Amino acid sequence: MASFSLHLSHTLGSFSLRPIKASSNGVPFSKPKSGGPTILELPLEKIRRPLMRTRANDPAKVKDLMESIQQIGLQEPIDVLEVDGVYYGFSGCHRFEAHQRLGLPTIRCKIRRGTKETLRRGST
């Protein structure tokens, strides 16, 4: 299996992306549909969370997700918007927190590309 490296801007540093068969918690990946979003396993620290959170995560939901992820792995990737090499999480806050609390280094993400304008529209 070939491996490749992605070099990002100096603000993010660099990290290697490689084709993988399963997420860090063992769930196999399915092939992405052509023309659709890309599915990748990203380091948690490379994902910026929304700046204006309107509510806190439900602790019971996070606990339930932690148990589920430990038993059967993450079943649904979180949604991430990539803008100029920076990743912004916009859906999956409970799953993201569950991964953090479990100490998992990466999370499976459904990545869509956007522009800075996309970010501005989302904050209004």
Image (cartoon, helix red, strand yellow):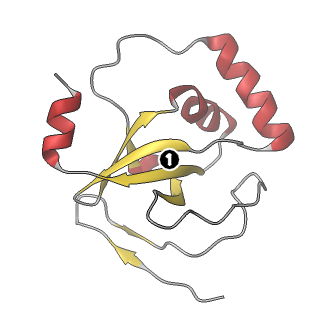
Q: Secondary structure at mark 1?
A: helix
- Percent across and percent down for residue 11 are 23, 58
- Percent across and percent down for residue 92 are 52, 32
- Measuring 32% from the left and 65% from the top, which residue is drawn there? 13
Tally of numbered tags: 1
- Percent across and percent down for residue 32 are 57, 63
36 or 91, which lies in front?
36
- Percent across and percent down for residue 58 are 59, 11
Q: Quadrant of residue 5?
A: bottom left
- Measuring 56% from the left and 75% from the top, which residue is drawn there? 18
Q: Is residue 54 above or below residue 34?
A: above
Identify the residue position indicated by label 1 in the image: 44
- Measuring 44% from the left and 48% from the top, which residue is drawn there? 45
- Give the side of residue 86 with respect to residue 77, left or right: left
- Measuring 48% from the left and 83% from the top, which residue is drawn there? 4
- Give the side of residue 1 with respect to residue 122, left or right: right
Residue situated furthest right in the rendering: 71
Residue situated furthest front in the rendering: 34
Q: Residues within 10 Å of mark 1 (few under 14, many from 20)?
A: some
Q: Is residue 124 above or below residue 16?
A: above
Q: Amino acid at mark 1?
A: Leu
- Give the side of residue 55 with respect to residue 94, left or right: left
Q: Quadrant of residue 22?
A: bottom right
- Give the side of residue 33 with respect to residue 7, left or right: right
Identify the image quadrant of the N terminus: bottom right
Identify the image quadrant of the C terminus: top left
119 or 70, which lies in front?
119
Q: Is residue 10 above or below residue 51?
A: below
